[in-house]
Image: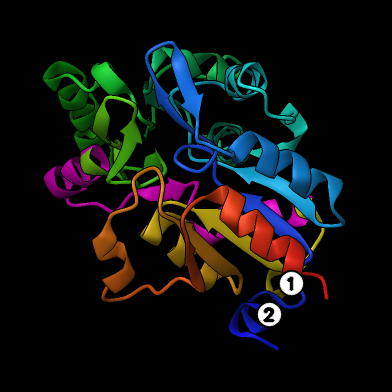
């Protein structure tokens, strides 16, 4: 058996990151990465189970799926694991009323959540909403709480748009952690709960699943810590230095999703 055969043997389910793997977002919604529309279609025609696993927190899950379908991807809302619906569940279970520092595009996800008299802060990738005034307001809410709770939808450092690299929610999460002397609770990748819920929805064990992502820490490291295998694509936010990361080593590096799918269809589920 060749090296790829060993690395991919027994894979029955595939988790796909969206931004940087399927598409690069940007003005007008975004553009598909070359070969990715066909790659998803081929995966879905195979015996492998497929689920989309994203930290996208500028758009509601419905808007994101609408955009992907416009770009030609075969994807439905029920196939996407995203942090906002998971966060709503946590807020309800724990009786938390959040002060929201989120993008207007995702605010509708929190329509059913009580935001009066906040007893926690929830932040997501707010984009231009990360003004000094808004971040400072979140800081003030946290400092007034006896037991401050900060929930962050993801902890990414940056992501790639068609116009270049963009600061992500993790940078602002760290600022609030530092200023308030607290630790945020992350909903989304790389949190183990997020990956476990995606696996449950996929219906496979961790050792039968593989994650394909462009983020060496959030996608690859997060998946591997849950017992999955993970491939990093050299698209999206990938940097050559990722292949020499001091703590995380992917199970394989591929040029793009199309190459990953070629390898999976050759070797997986054998």
Residue 242: give x, y in percent of width and height: 30, 63
Q: Name above or below for residue 21 compared with residue 211.
A: above
Q: Say which residue label 1 marks.
A: 267
Query: Distance from label 1 to label 2 (Cα)?
Result: 5 Å
Q: Report the side of 31 relative to 46 (left or right).
A: left
The question of residue 88 being in magenta is answered with no
Q: Residue at x 50, y 50 (%)?
A: 256
Q: Earlier in the sequence, mark 1 or mark 2?
A: 2
Tell me: 100 left or right of 37.
left
Q: Give the camera-side residue of 46 and 160.
A: 46
The secondary element bearing badge 1 is classed as helix
Q: Secondary structure at mark 2?
A: helix
**Magenta stretch holds residue 173:** yes
Q: Residues within 10 Å of mark 1 (few under 14, many from 20)?
A: some
Pointers 1 and 2 in contact (C-beta within 8 Å): yes
**Magenta stretch secondary structure, dominant:** helix
Q: Does residue 158 appear to the left or right of 136 in the view shown?
A: right
Q: Residue at x 77, y 76 (%)?
A: 10
Magenta part of the protein: which range? 172-201
Question: Which of 181 and 75 lies nearest the eye of the viewer?
Answer: 75
- What residue is pinned by disc 2? 5
Q: How many residues crowd around disc 2 within 10 Å: few (fewer than 14), some, or many (20 or more)?
A: some
Task: Look at the image and tell me in which quarter the C terminus lies.
Answer: bottom right
Query: Residue 150: percent from the left, percent from the top?
Result: 34, 41
């Amino acid at each position: 058996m060749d090296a790829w055969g060993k690395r991919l043997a027994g894979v029955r389910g595939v988790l796909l990151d969206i931004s940087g793997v399927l598409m690069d977002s940007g003005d007008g919604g975004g553009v598909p990465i070359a070969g990715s529309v066909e790659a998803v279609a081929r995966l879905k025609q195979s015996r492998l189970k497929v689920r989309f696993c994203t930290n996208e927190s500028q758009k509601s899950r419905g808007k994101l799926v609408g955009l992907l379908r416009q770009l030609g991807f075969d994807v439905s809302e029920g196939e996407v694991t995203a942090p906002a619906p998971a966060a709503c569940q946590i807020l309800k279970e724990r009786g938390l009323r959040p002060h929201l520092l989120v993008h207007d595009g995702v605010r509708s996800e929190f329509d059913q959540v009580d935001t009066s008299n906040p007893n926690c802060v929830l932040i997501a990738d707010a984009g231009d909403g990360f003004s000094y005034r808004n971040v400072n307001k979140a800081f003030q809410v946290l400092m007034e709480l006896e037991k401050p709770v900060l929930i962050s939808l993801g902890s990414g450092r940056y992501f790639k748009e068609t116009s270049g690299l963009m600061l992500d929610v993790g940078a602002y999460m760290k600022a609030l952690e530092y200023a308030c002397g607290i630790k945020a609770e992350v909903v989304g990748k790389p949190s183990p709960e997020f990956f476990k819920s995606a696996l449950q929805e996929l219906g496979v064990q961790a050792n039968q699943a593989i994650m394909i992502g462009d983020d060496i820490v959030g996608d690859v490291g997060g998946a591997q810590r849950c017992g999955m295998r993970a491939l990093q694509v050299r698209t999206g936010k990938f940097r050559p230095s990722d292949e020499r990361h001091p703590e995380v080593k992917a199970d394989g590096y591929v040029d793009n999703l199309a190459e990953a799918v070629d390898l999976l269809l050759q070797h997986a589920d054998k």
